[in-house]
Amino acid sequence: MEPFTSDRLQLPRNMIENSMFEEEPDVVDLAKEPCLHPLEPDEVEYEPRGSRLLVRGLGEHEMDEDEEDYESSAKLLGMSFMNRSSGLRNNITGYRQGPDGPCSLPSGRTMLVCTFVLVVAVSVIMVIYLLPRCTFTKEGCHKKNQSMELIQPIATNGKLFPWAQIRLPQNIIPLQYELTIQPNLTTMKFKGSVEIKIQALKVTQNIILHSSGHNISKILFTSVVSKQEKQVEFLEYKFHDQIAIIAPEVLLDGHNYTLKIDYSANISNNYYGFYGVTYEDENKEEKYFAATQFEPLAARSAFPCFDEPAFKATFIIKIVREEHYTALSNMPKKSSVQIEDKLIKDEFFESVKMSTYLVAFIVGELKNMTQETNGTLVSIYTVPEKIDQVKPALDTAVKLLEFFQHYFEIDYPLQKLDLVAIPDIQAGAMENWGLITFREETLLYDNETSSVMDKKLVTRIIAHELAHQWFGNLVTMQWWNDLWLNEGFATFMEYFSLNKNFRHLSSYEDFLNARFMTMKKDSLNSSHPTSSSVQSSEQIEEMFDSLSYFKGASLLLMLKTFLTEDVFQHCIILYLQNYSYASIQSDDLWNTFNEVTKSLDVKKMMKTWTLQPGFPLVTVQRKGKQILVQQERFFLSTTDSGIHPLDSSHLWHIPLSYITSDCKAHDCPYVALLDKKSDVLNLTEEVQWVKFNVDMTGYYIVHYADHDWEALIQQLQRNISVLSDKDRAGLINNIFELSSLGKVPLKKAFDLIDYLGNETHTAPITEALFQTDLIYNLLEKIGELELAKRSVNRVAKLLQQHIQQQTWTDEGTLSKRELRSILLDFACTHHLENCTTDAMKLFQEWVDSKGTKRLPTDVMPVVFKVGAKTEAGWTFLFERYGSSESESERNKILEALASSEDVRKLHWLLKASLDGDIIRSQKLAMIIKIVGRSFAGHLLAWDFVKENWSRLIQKFHLGSYTIQSIVAGTTHLFATKTHLSEVKMFFEAQSETTARLRCVQEAIQIIQLNIQWMENHLKNLPLWL
Ligand SMILES: [Zn+2]
């Protein structure tokens, strides 16, 4: 699966306490209020609502629209919401107080009544709490998906449920499923019937499998020996999504049996399971569409099954559909039979052996374009009106399929491969075997409105999903703890295959960016080992994070560089061959490497990377011809005494690489394995400078002694070409990260980027802008506008010539075009040069032509953003959003709409996207992230998340990538103690599971780091910035 990320995750740095925010949060204040008499006539009930208080009870007071507007205006004016809520709190206190003064003593009668009421209330709460959602265990109340050992769970009918664990027992395995689904897309319900051939591996009488949200009408059991079909009893245990079938006879070891389950269910209205969507076609007619998204845990909601990746089986899928729809599934269609008037039953060929999360089917009005390659029919499907946008995807898919078959030396095993653009899907794409689903913007390409970045996105995602057909589909992780084996490999192969086949797309720049981003996340205390133990659904959802994807891919890149490309390829071919159609663990991968590398223990080396969180900081000290290298964990952790970087308990086996000022092409880069805390490397001669981690292919950060940093800074001033653009970007990244850690003064980091005027490549400029933009954003959010402006001016001066050279066209190499888009965005955001005037002129010409004049696609986002700043421009763009047939264009428009400074418009956008009618909910995370970054919207975005938290987790599931992105996007620029306690308290008030989520822990740590960074840096910034 490819979680959709529209831009680079901004994990922030820091900031200082601002006196504007130095108030205790509301909830704490309330707790201190001593004289509230429960159930007295003037009873009030308090709950935090957004950043203000909602008062309920007698005289209920909700905010009316005027007050909402006041809130919005206040935000726009940059007022602290805490100041505003303290104003409200004063009103409340006034309301609450009796005529006798602030705190009259209660009477004896009141005390008695209160005590009685309290006892009754506590009893009722206990009963309510324990009854519906709990099962008694040794540890007390057991809630859904917690991994405690149960004494005995209770089934829905009150009987004892015979299985207490989240994971299914290993005594039964499925061999084959025959599944018939009959959806009704108008009523949003479906009928299902599944026949499962199973085999007993141990003697048992209970068959435990997954089922969620099904009305099961009948279960028949047949023994292959007796051949007698018997209706059987079953029990349901909803907290684990399990049913237990009580067999009429003891199942014998090695014998086969058949289950036939008839059921019905609702077609899901969120993005999981078998879900339905509506969309408008080009004639504004409402259309229905149904698709599946099973990874990780939703196959069980479409049909009863053994829903764990290791339970591989074959699948025969049959779909009953109305005749104007097309049905697709993993395999080619075997037959189509009319079964009733206007009802067709499609049957698909039996699948290869695969995991349940890879099963897929789709019913909708579709058109396709097809091409045959090496015995496989590759098709791109879309809703009919967008069929003219599929050709680039078809060419790309065919080319990459051929590449992967050749590179892996294993043919793609199916006769067909469908890539389908789904009108609404939460993930970026999903690799279902033979039937890959995509967002429209990750598969379709419109010549008029798709930019060079859109082209790269489409190519990348296709590559990722095709790589999964081997890594994930053919060879699958046994359990979700090793998700990185799927996602790390697919992500690595995505960049690797683009580099081989579409070199002009410069995808290495994106991979470099992704590594920087991931290391930032991995340096926090909330990080986790790439292979981590997981049980509950939230824990499994949380594995879909950048560590599984990008750290996994980065480790493979490091290993490939160390072993050489040929050896690496040999190892992964062997791995795929050894484990085709099987389920594996990380050790199986490393054992295969060891088979090839023999004397080098790859397993021992890589375990130091996959079983430990974080990554090393390598410190380099040079004395004459000797280089002392040391390792410790690069650890951004806050303590009372400040940032605490040292963590000596970790040791990595680090493949070091380095170059020097006197490098000769034939012996550079030098390579050495550092498998202890420190070591000494010897140079043949004294040199001017050394640079470690060549091309940033190693997953570590390097710190140099003062004079070595100075030598590198001077080299960049003199001549940049002796270092690659990856190395230059790496130096910028490392020095800014080291300044967060307190190892290097921030001023030195700015000194290093002073060479930027001479920079010729995109990656270093992008990295410098990313780092400085973060500082700008934080300074701006706490109201240090003058300092924020000075930070921009300093960078703007360096990039002035670059900005002046940009044209408003689509000319140049892809990398240059991308740089143009980034530089003009920077210039227009900060009103540099004539940027906004030029952009506005283009926008106006486009509006005057009623949107028919072609805008250069690379600069379109900037032009739209500038245009959206005016009322008329925003309205024109919004109307265009409704009528455009190009998802790429709609995305650019939405980004511009969300960049508005009008808080009412932002609030409307957020709400509309949560509702999902006018703006699809798949866009919500992107909108929240953009709004959360802006001065006008960052408090609003957080308010919105708090107010709508329960709806958000209903739509996107607790722990999911979308929720991770929403939490990070709304909190990462907070830098005050007030916000810190508010964020903490909000999540703690939800549930223990919520407060424990990694993304919540990460958000809290980032705010702490922001606070600390500001304490350390703010007073010095004016002196040198
Ligand atoms: Zn994936």
Image (spheres, rainbow, N blue to C red):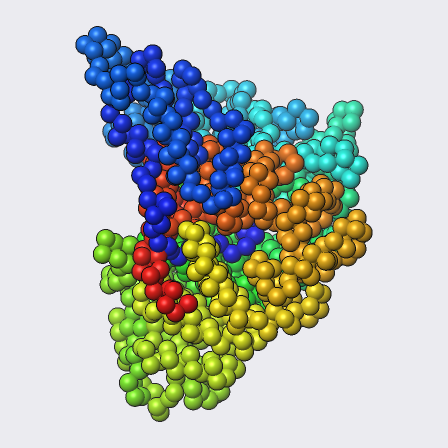
The residue sitting at 55% across, 20% down in the picture is 217
The residue sitting at 73% across, 58% down in the picture is 842
For the C terminus, the image quarter is bottom left
- Of all residues, the one furthest to the top in this rendering is 109
Relative image position of residue 484 (x, y in whole percent):
45, 54
Q: How many marks?
A: 0
Viewer-nearest residue: 652 or 30 = 30
Relative image position of residue 399 (x, y in whole percent):
68, 62
- Of all residues, the one furthest to the left in this rendering is 108
Viewer-nearest residue: 435 or 175 = 435
Viewer-nearest residue: 455 or 367 = 455
Residue 651 appears in the rendering = yes
The residue sitting at 59% across, 64% down in the picture is 832
Judge whether 378 appears above or below 592 on screen: above
- Of all residues, the one furthest to the bottom in this rendering is 685
Relative image position of residue 44 (x, y in whole percent):
36, 19
- Is 803 situated left or right of 28 in this image? right
Judge whether 509 appears above or below 315 on screen: below
